Image: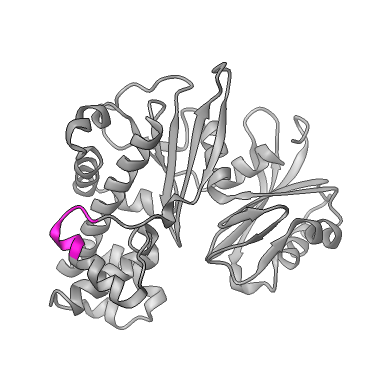
Amino acid sequence: MSESGEQVLAGDIGGTNLRLALVERRGRPRVVASRRTPVNDHPGLSAAVEAFLGELPARPRRACFGVAGTITGRRIEGVNLPWAIDADEVESSCGLEAVRLINDFHAAAHGVEQLGGEGWFPLRPDEPEVEEGGPVAVLGAGTGLGQALLVPTSERRERVVVSSEGGHRDFAPTDELQGRLLTWLRARHGRVSTERVLSGPGLGAIYAFLVEAEGRPACAAVASLEEAARPPAILAGAGSDPTCAAAVGLLTDVYGAEAGNLALTVLARGGVFLAGGMAPELLRDEGRAERFRRAFRAKGRFEDLLTSYAVRVVDDPDLGLLGAAAEA
């Protein structure tokens, strides 16, 4: 971990875009300079890092990158990345003294610890109280579905991050429509993970299911786009097109149910934080926020317990960078 006040290089490497930043660690970490580019614009991480470092007046000594994937030693093969990352190779190619790789939601969980009272909004205006230092669940849908936990140590002086690939566990439908969606997806993919449904591509798949299997009318604005470009258009069209609205509503139900599952897993008395680019746009709409809340607490005998947990939507775009900087 870097010294207080030192400037470090932080990276948030997703399946679609990567962000690199120079971050000063003095009190709450502060982004000094940053750059965002599509992942596919670079032949590898080292090339992206070199281009960014070339823009800085001075090179940092340390770096930490939060990457969408599972770390094996000092190497990562991201599920949604076009290239592998080797920390030793990045160190030697870019002239850095120390490079760390962590899962992107490991970084997001550390970022939650840096937020304090900023960078998020409550899912309900009468937010329940949170237990100071209590367990926290962090999850977010984007190109994939990331999850992590913040768990108190036995002495309860601090919380430690527990990384997770829970987004790849089996999708569990909660009603008949979701059951038909599972059958439709299984015919195309075999095994169906929660990420197949709860993600940007998952929103596209839900829309296709509603049109192809459920006979819903296609939205002209969506039908004219390539498959990869459809999810943002579906979300944007939810206010005017009934099929887009149905797709976004179904995704919201799955999101709420999965957040409730993770909250039960860790007994999230310290709160549930929804990260990732999709959550703020999805849940600023009060109708969808209420739909999420219903799905979140619909756990039978544990409904009262889920109702007592605070759910917060992170709208700070630097969350992953702040968390990576804390680990550099």
Residue 308 rendering spot, x and y as whole percentages:
27, 26
For the residue pair 314 and 254, the one nearer the viewer reads as 254
Coloring applied to the structure: one colour
Please state the extent of the stretch shown in magenta in the rendering: 173-179
Say which residue appears at 30% left-offset and 63% top-offset: 235
Residue 140 rendering spot, x and y as whole percentages:
42, 49
For the residue pair 69 and 230, the one nearer the viewer reads as 69
**Image height check: is 221 above or below 236?**
below
Q: Quadrant of residue 236?
A: bottom left
On screen, residue 69 versus residue 10, left or right, reads left
For the residue pair 63 and 194, the one nearer the viewer reads as 194
Residue 292 rendering spot, x and y as whole percentages:
24, 45
Say which residue appears at 56% left-offset and 23% top-offset: 153
Say which residue appears at 57% left-offset and 31% top-offset: 160
Asked if residue 177 lies in the magenta stretch, the reply is: yes
Residue 126 rendering spot, x and y as whole percentages:
25, 26
Q: Residue furthest front?
A: 190
Q: Quadrant of the C terminus?
A: top right
Q: Quadrant of residue 213?
A: bottom left
For the residue pair 113 and 209, the one nearer the viewer reads as 209
On screen, residue 133 versus residue 296, left or right, reads right
Q: Quadrant of the N terminus?
A: top right
On screen, residue 226 versus residue 183, left or right, reads right
Q: Quadrant of residue 158?
A: top right
